[in-house]
Image (cartoon, grey):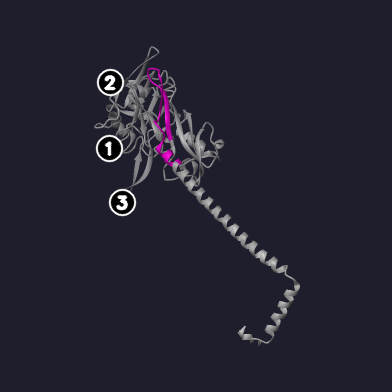
Amino acid sequence: MACHKVTVGGWPAALLVLERRGDSSPTVRTDALSPACTARERRDEREPQDCVLVHHLPAQAPAQPLMDLLLNLWPSHFPTVSVARRVCARARVWIKEVKEMRDTSVRQAWWSESLAAPQTIVFLPDYPRRSPHETKLEVLFEDEHLAVVVKEPGLRLHGGVRTLANMLAAKEQPSLSPSMQEDALASAIPLHFLEAEIGGLVLCAKTATAAALSARGESAGYSLRRRFRGIFCGAEPAALPDGWTPLRSVPSVRFGRVLEAETETALPAAALRRAAGAGGGARLLGDVEYGGEEAPRIRRNQLFLVVAGISFTDLQGLRHSIALQGSVDRFEHLFLREAKVWRLESDRLAEERAGKRAGVRVRRCERGTRGTALIAKLIQPNEGSAGRQRSTGSETAGKPTPAREDW
């Protein structure tokens, strides 16, 4: 029981809240890349990060109603029983059973049933969305269970109107073909979290079986690995963080040097950004969150980091490697602009140096002419100089001396 001070119609009031706390049973938060954590341990509460939530019922656990399990496991997603019923009716909760030590297909959960071990609850968070967003996505791979789409920078996965989840739910202009499997989802869902400021490839599930296999520790998931490509500033290739391979570099007037590098890892993007921000050498261009306010940047919230490739294993055991076609337009534009500015600045400095050299030559010639005239005067005979002095004195002898005020 908790008491909160509120205001109703301008009058102070008190609100008593009955808080529900979850049990200590293990819950796996799966975005196919991040370690297990609860909703209260999210790094950024403003952007939803849960893509697939999986809970394995512990061995020898007694049978419990599904509603009680959902309300205790994920209270932020299931605040009341009515909400849990509606979520189950939208086919967002699935059950994976294990019979005779063999995995069976995933079935849709019913809100009134009870579950016992060994069973697994697969929850696909259905964040409130107003309506599907009719926008076509670029698709690089698709089969009956999985798909790989391209997410542009600045696009959220969940929590808004123009999001990747809403684009995948488009009806008039669908980007993916519907699956013919029995456990097909109403719309594909992303399987791993990717920050809004990062663009690139995203692996999506079209069936509940594909979503259930994204749990970590369950046949190693899809062995998902992503290849990140980013722009670093202000350092040589030797100063890159561990694991990064340099691709190209050009000198820059603003940042000293602009370097493009890539790395392939199974870690989330936050871990790479944290490692790059902690190092004292090269820094990601535009990463203000981990690089600090002094991090190099061009525009606000424009991070030069993309997922250029992704490799995974499908449900048939085949390994796929998908990569972006061509180069990243933002990266090419940045390199062309930095090279142009560097060339113009180099030409300007060269002209200034040439002008300074020309001025030095002119001054040297003037000094040489004055020096020659002075030497010619010094080598004249003394008689001539004495005569000139006497003549000058005789000429000025007869002239009157000017008054002091005329000086």
Chain-order first, disc 1 or disc 3: 3
Element type at mark 2: loop
Element type at mark 1: loop
Q: Nearer the viewer, mark 2 or mark 3?
A: 2
Q: Amino acid at mark 1?
A: Arg
- Quarter occupied by residue 135: top left
Q: CA distance from mark 1 to mark 2?
A: 27 Å
The residue carrying pointer 2 sits among few (fewer than 14), some (14 to 19) or many (20 or more) residues within 10 Å by Cα, namely few
Q: CA distance from mark 2 to mark 3?
A: 56 Å
Specify whether residue 103 is painted magenta: no
Q: Is residue 303 left or right of residue 256?
A: left
Residue 23 showing in the rendered view:
no
* Viewer-nearest residue: 127 or 250: 250
Q: Which x, y percent locates residue 34?
A: 44, 30
The residue where tag 1 is placed is 130
Q: Amino acid at mark 3?
A: Gly
Q: Which x, y percent locates residue 326?
A: 40, 32
Query: From which residue to which does the magenta span run?
Result: 306-335
Chain-order first, disc 1 or disc 2: 1
Q: Determine contact: label 2, label 3, CB under 8 Å.
A: no
* Viewer-nearest residue: 307 or 114: 307
The residue where tag 2 is placed is 180
- Tell me: residue 12, above or below residue 265: below
Q: Is residue 139 left or right of residue 242?
A: left
The residue where tag 3 is placed is 10
- Quarter occupied by residue 298: top left
Q: Which x, y percent locates residue 334?
A: 44, 42
Residue 261 showing in the rendered view:
yes
Q: Nearer the viewer, mark 1 or mark 3?
A: 1
Chain-order first, disc 2 or disc 3: 3
